[in-house]
Image (cartoon, helix red, strand yellow):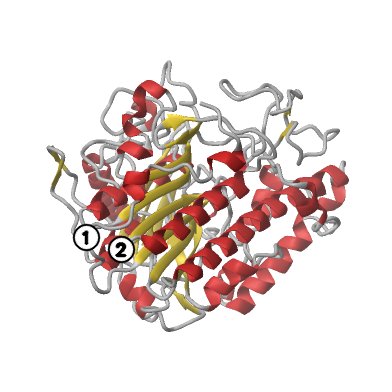
């Protein structure tokens, strides 16, 4: 099925979106969850960035931001945990979308989990999923786990993870594959779909839930040239000076505590002054910044559409990112299944090649560890790892009817498993014990509404992580964490109240705490269906080695 962009905007499942039905329960808010992809902790203006994000900045100024919200360090697990309110292994996505043959690693959302949409439909909500799904196979024979079969009335999605922004693959509307044509740019297309959906809700009596999952700014580094040119020369000083400038702004804004300091430059990243191909290096970050700004511009249009419905005052909007800045390097050989040509038939040049400037549809590059280190200021490590650089996420919440302490920061510890609980709490909805004949795994997340309504409110939490053998547990201000090693992973211990950049390992001086927290981790791993990375049969599973 092929549809031109301009022709298929208005094509919808009319029955699912028709006006009428049960009236909206008094006080039930509309809910919008906006998820950025591979965006670091401080890549938006209201968290210290030099990137222009006026719409997110305004959202923060009229809402509440969190300094201690965390994801799972990788796209698929974060999406699974966000959608279901349980840990990703419990939801069947312990790694990515490959099937390892054991319950926690089937690469498909478990039927013992419910999505936010499935839970909210029981509370009279209309639901829509627009953007990156990536919690199941793109194989049409497995579409029973596509969003149209997991509680969403209306969907416009890329089932796959990364995709060419100008020539996307894996596009699906209402569980039917479609293809993009014409002057297409994926961030803009997702925005148009979200705006269209929200506008249609003006005539619908029900409250609505919209899950808007942008692919920006995940690689490939691609943006419209006019947006890229806005950042020409912006990164000429290089990552060292820019990182110091971001840190200074973050301290002044209250994003980070100055007593933490800033993690030293990754020893694998050279000093800017010694880097060759500076024009290419700058261009990579210029494109990345343009991608973030394009997303922000889209979010502004979403807010405009919401305001036009007259429902803005009673709408809860949450914005977050799925993992920290991405240090992945694109190789010169195309990944299996990815298109190798643009929509006009031009070959795509893959790989981080200094002789090829990224940005257009015929390039496929990443911004690499050098700029990811800037994105994760002041922390160390990146996506994949569960040190703070991999899991720290910006979180902004706005709900004019309920959130009154505008521009405030909350220091409540939070995790993506809390998004489900927060949405249900806001909607006055219940979490089911059974759904469509399946026993449902009990909810793990906690509602963040108490901290959003009163930013001074904090409650001690114990939260866990595992991804590709990287492990962590946070209990209050203490964090036990280890980086996977074939030679044997070693626990590190940090007091986050004084050392959130994780440079002062206290494991040797506090073995009793290490033993206690390691036991907590082991107990969690056993009940959460975690399998040790070295004991997981990864043979024959595409992408199983990370």
How busy is the neighbourhood of tag 2: few (under 14 within 10 Å), some, or many (20 plus)?
some
Q: Which mark is residue 87?
A: none
Identity of the residue drawn at 39% across and 49% down: 128
Whichever of callouts 1 and 2 sits on the residue coming sooner in the sequence is 1
Q: CA distance from mark 1 to mark 2?
A: 7 Å
From this viewpoint, which residue is outermost toward the bottom?
405
Tell me the residue at 47%/21% (across/down): 542
Q: Is residue 27 above or below residue 205?
A: below
Asked whether the viewer can see residue 506, the reply is: no
Q: Which residue matches tag 1? A: 22
- Where residue 14 appears, as percent x and y from the top left, is 37, 45
Answer yes or no: do the residues labelled 1 and 2 have beta carbons within 8 Å? yes
User: Which residue is label 2 attached to?
Assistant: 205
Determine crowd level at label 1: few under 14, some 14-19, many 20+ residues with C-alpha closer than 10 A: few
Where's residue 493, x and y in %? Answer: 42, 56
x and y percent of residue 235 in the render? 80, 57
Query: In the shown orientation, is residue 406 left or right of residue 85?
Result: right
Relative image position of residue 134 (x, y in whole percent): 44, 37
Q: For the point 65% across and 49% down, which residue is it?
A: 372
Q: Secondary structure at mark 1?
A: loop
Judging depth in this view, the residue of 516 and 285 nearest the camera is: 285
Residue sitting nearer the eye, 339 or 354: 339
Identified at 29% across, 44% down, the residue is 151
245 lies left or right of 448: right
Q: Is residue 373 left or right of residue 413?
A: right
Per the image, label 2 sits on a secondary structure element best described as loop
> Where 221 falls versus 379 (above or below)?
above
Asked if 279 appears above or below 102 in the picture, the reply is below
């Amino acid at each position: 099925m092929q549809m031109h962009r301009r022709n298929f905007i208005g094509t919808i499942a009319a029955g699912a979106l028709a006006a009428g039905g049960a009236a909206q329960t008094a006080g039930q808010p509309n809910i919008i969850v906006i998820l950025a992809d591979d965006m670091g902790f401080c890549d938006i203006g209201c968290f210290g960035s030099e990137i222009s994000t006026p719409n997110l900045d305004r959202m923060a100024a009229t809402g509440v931001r969190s300094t201690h919200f965390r994801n799972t360090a990788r796209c698929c697990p974060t999406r699974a945990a966000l959608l279901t309110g349980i840990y990703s292994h419990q939801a069947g996505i312990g790694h990515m979308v490959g099937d390892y043959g054991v319950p926690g690693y089937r690469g498909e959302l478990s039927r013992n989990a419910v999505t936010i949409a499935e839970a909210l439909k029981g509370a009279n909500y209309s639901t829509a999923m627009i953007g990156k799904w990536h919690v199941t196979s793109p194989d049409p024979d497995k579409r029973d786990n596509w969003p149209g079969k997991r509680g969403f009335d209306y969907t416009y999605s890329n089932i796959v993870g990364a995709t060419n922004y100008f020539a996307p693959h894996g596009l699906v509307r209402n569980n039917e594959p479609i293809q993009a044509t014409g002057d297409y740019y994926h961030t803009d297309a997702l925005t148009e779909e979200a705006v269209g959906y929200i506008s249609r809700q003006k005539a619908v009596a029900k409250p609505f839930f919209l899950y808007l999952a942008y692919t920006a700014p995940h690689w490939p580094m691609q943006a419209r040239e006019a947006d890229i040119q806005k950042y020409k020369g912006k990164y000429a000083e290089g990552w060292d000076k820019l990182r110091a400038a971001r840190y200074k702004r973050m301290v002044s804004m209250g994003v980070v505590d100055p007593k933490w300091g800033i993690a030293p430059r990754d020893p694998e990243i050279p000093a800017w002054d010694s880097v060759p191909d500076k024009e290419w290096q700058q261009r990579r970050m210029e494109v990345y910044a343009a991608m973030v700004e394009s997303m922000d511009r889209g979010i502004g249009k979403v807010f405009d559409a919401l305001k036009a419905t007259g429902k803005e005052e009673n709408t809860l909007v949450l914005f977050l990112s799925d993992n920290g800045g991405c240090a992945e390097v694109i190789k010169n050989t195309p990944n299996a299944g990815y298109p190798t040509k643009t929509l006009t038939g031009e070959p795509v040049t893959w790989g981080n090649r200094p002789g090829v400037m990224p940005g257009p549809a015929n390039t496929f590059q990443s911004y690499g560890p050098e700029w990811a280190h800037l994105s994760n200021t002041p922390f160390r490590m990146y996506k994949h790892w569960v040190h703070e650089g991999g899991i720290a996420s910006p979180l902004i919440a706005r709900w004019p009817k309920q959130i009154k302490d505008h521009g405030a920061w909350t220091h409540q510890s939070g995790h993506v498993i809390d998004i489900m609980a927060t949405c249900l709490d806001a909607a006055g909805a219940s979490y089911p014990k059974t759904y469509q004949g399946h026993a449902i795994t009990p909810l793990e997340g906690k509602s963040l509404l108490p901290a959003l309504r009163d930013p001074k409110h904090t409650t001690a939490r114990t939260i866990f992580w595992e991804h590709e053998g990287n492990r962590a547990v946070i209990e209050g201000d203490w964090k036990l964490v280890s980086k996977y090693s074939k030679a044997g992973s070693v626990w590190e211990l940090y007091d986050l109240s004084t050392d959130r950049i994780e440079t002062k390992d206290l494991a040797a001086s506090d073995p009793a705490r290490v033993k206690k927290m390691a036991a907590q981790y082991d107990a969690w791993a056993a009940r959460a269906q975690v399998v040790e990375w070295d004991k997981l049969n990864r043979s024959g599973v595409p992408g199983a080695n990370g």
